[in-house]
Structures are given as C-alpha cells and as structure tokens.
C-alpha cells in the first residue's frame, strides 16, 4: 500500500508565500489580540500606562525645550507642539521595540509549525496602534483645552499615520530578523529608541534647524513623519516638502530591503532561534 508523503518546508517562495499570508490571517488576528491582552495583564492601572508615559515625557520636554531652552513654537502652545510630536514617535518607538523582539518572543511557535513569519512582526506593529489611538484621544482633549482648531490639512493625517506605520514596520523587519541571529540587538534597540528621541524633532520644531542643514537632518525618516503630523494637525507653518520627499523614499527603501532580508533569512529562523 502506497503511503502519502507530506513534505514540511521551512518556508514557501513566490506567490504561494503571499497567498499564505492571507490564509493565515486568523493567526494574525490571534497574535495581535493576545499581545494587547498580555501588555496590560496584571497591571494596576491597565491602559492608563498608555497615557502616563507620553504625558510625563511631554512635561519633561516642555520644561527642557520650552521653558529652559526657550525654543520657538511658532505661536503654538508648547505642550501641544510636544505632544503632537510624541504621537508618531511613541508609536514608532513602541512598534519598533515590540516587533524587534517578536520573533524571539514567539520562538516556541516558530520552531514547531510553519506559517509566514511576516505575520509576527506585522501583528506587533498593529498592536502598537492601540496605544497610539489612546494617546490621540488625549491629544484631542489638549487641543480643546487650549482652543486650537485644526485646519483643512487634517484630512491628510491618515497619510502620515500610514507613513509612521510603514517606518516602524520596515525598521522592525530588519531588527526582528537580525535579533534572531544576533541577540546583541536586544541591547541596541533601547539605545536607538532613546537616542532617536533627542535627534528627532519631538521636543522642538524642526524649523529651528538652520536651512543649510534641513536636507541632511531629513535623512532621519521620522523628521518627515513628525513634521507631517504637526503640519496636518496644528498647521505649523509650511511643511518642508524636500525633507518629506526624502523621508518617503527612505521609508520605501527600508521596507523593500527589510522584506528582502527577512525573506532571505526566514528559512533559518527555526534552526537558529
């Protein structure tokens, strides 16, 4: 009697792999929901942590840059200026950190069954949107408190939310794949997040950067993202379009190269992890 043979591969390639992403969509929903529950499980104040962290950071940056350094806010209340910069940055920092650790955190599942590994870092980035939405509600409350009404540019906000998501996803693909083989990155990621907070225009407006350095400064893709948020929500002067263009190109390059490297190393994850 001839027995049927089942071949278990480390990963599929070509169109089959991308079809598998749709076939395993329920796993994506499960991982995202599980991460949301685990994040606040057995915490005393629950989702309030999503408010406390950006608020405390806003207070510190407002005192340092607004009161002590006396940075120009362009007539915008400094707490709103800072919190508007905190929205995309906090989302990026959380998603970048969570997606970087996502493969290692799910090592048991990865080493036992096949599924498109892209599901894991992608679900981590989606999970970080929960904190973003909570912080966005607080941003709306601040704007009402200070009597600041957004202009028509607010309709372009979804584009900048997508750009922030793409930045976090692309960077997360690189870090998650690298962390499987090089565990040193678990020490590098917190440093990058902390250092990036100060070189990105979170606590100040990028308009204070001298014009001759603006293009070079825009090589940090989060500069274009944060500037776009402030422009669409606060109407902060005119956006620096060359810098935004550079940010979009860099983010597209990071995603493309991230997917390439992730797919290149994906078949070795189960062996190395």
Image (spheres, grey):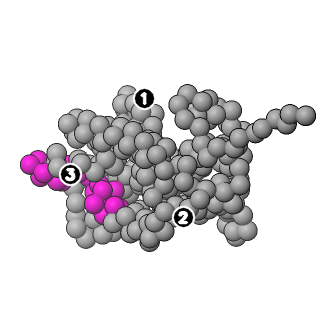
Q: Nearer the viewer, residue 131 or 264?
A: 264
**Mark 1, residue position:** 155
Q: Residue at x 41, y 33 (%)?
A: 159
Looking at the rendered image, the quarter that the N terminus falls into is top right
Q: Does residue 65 lie above or below 249 as drawn?
A: below
Tag in front: 2 or 3: 3
Give the alpha-carbon distance from disc 1 to disc 3, as whole Å: 26 Å
Q: Tag on residue 52?
A: 2
Q: Does residue 121 lie above or below 152 as drawn?
A: below
In this picture, which residue range is highlighted in magenta?
Answer: 196-213
Q: Is residue 241 magenta?
A: no
Q: Is residue 207 left or right of residue 121?
A: left
Q: Residue at x 48, y 63 (%)?
A: 181
Q: Residue at x 34, y 56 (%)?
A: 202
Q: Is residue 67 left or right of residue 59?
A: left
Q: Position of residue 59 (x, y in %)?
A: 41, 66
């Amino acid at each position: 009697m001839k027995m049927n043979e089942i071949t278990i591969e480390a990963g599929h390639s070509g169109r089959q792999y991308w079809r598998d992403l749709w076939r395993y969509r329920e796993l994506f929903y499960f991982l995202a929901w599980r991460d949301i529950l685990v994040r606040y499980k057995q915490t005393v104040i629950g989702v309030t942590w999503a408010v406390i962290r950006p608020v405390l950071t806003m207070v510190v940056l407002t005192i340092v840059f607004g009161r002590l350094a006396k940075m120009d806010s362009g007539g915008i209340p400094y707490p709103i200026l800072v919190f508007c910069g905190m929205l995309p940055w906090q989302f990026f920092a959380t998603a970048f950190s969570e997606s970087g650790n996502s493969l290692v955190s799910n090592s048991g599942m990865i080493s036992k069954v096949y599924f498109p590994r892209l599901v894991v870092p992608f679900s981590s980035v989606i999970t970080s949107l929960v904190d973003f939405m909570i912080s966005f509600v607080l941003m709306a409350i601040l704007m009402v408190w200070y009597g600041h009404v957004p202009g028509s540019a607010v309709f372009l906000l979804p584009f900048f939310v997508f750009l922030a998501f793409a930045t976090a996803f692309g960077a997360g693909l690189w870090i998650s794949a690298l962390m499987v083989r090089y565990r040193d990155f678990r020490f590098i990621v917190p440093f990058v997040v902390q250092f990036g907070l100060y070189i990105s225009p979170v606590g100040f407006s990028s308009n204070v950067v001298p014009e001759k350095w603006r293009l070079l400064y825009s090589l940090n893709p989060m500069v274009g993202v944060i500037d776009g948020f402030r422009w669409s929500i606060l109407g902060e002067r005119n956006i620096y379009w060359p810098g935004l263009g550079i940010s979009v190109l860099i983010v597209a390059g990071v995603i493309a190269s991230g997917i390439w490297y992730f797919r290149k190393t994906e078949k070795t994850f189960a062996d190395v992890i």
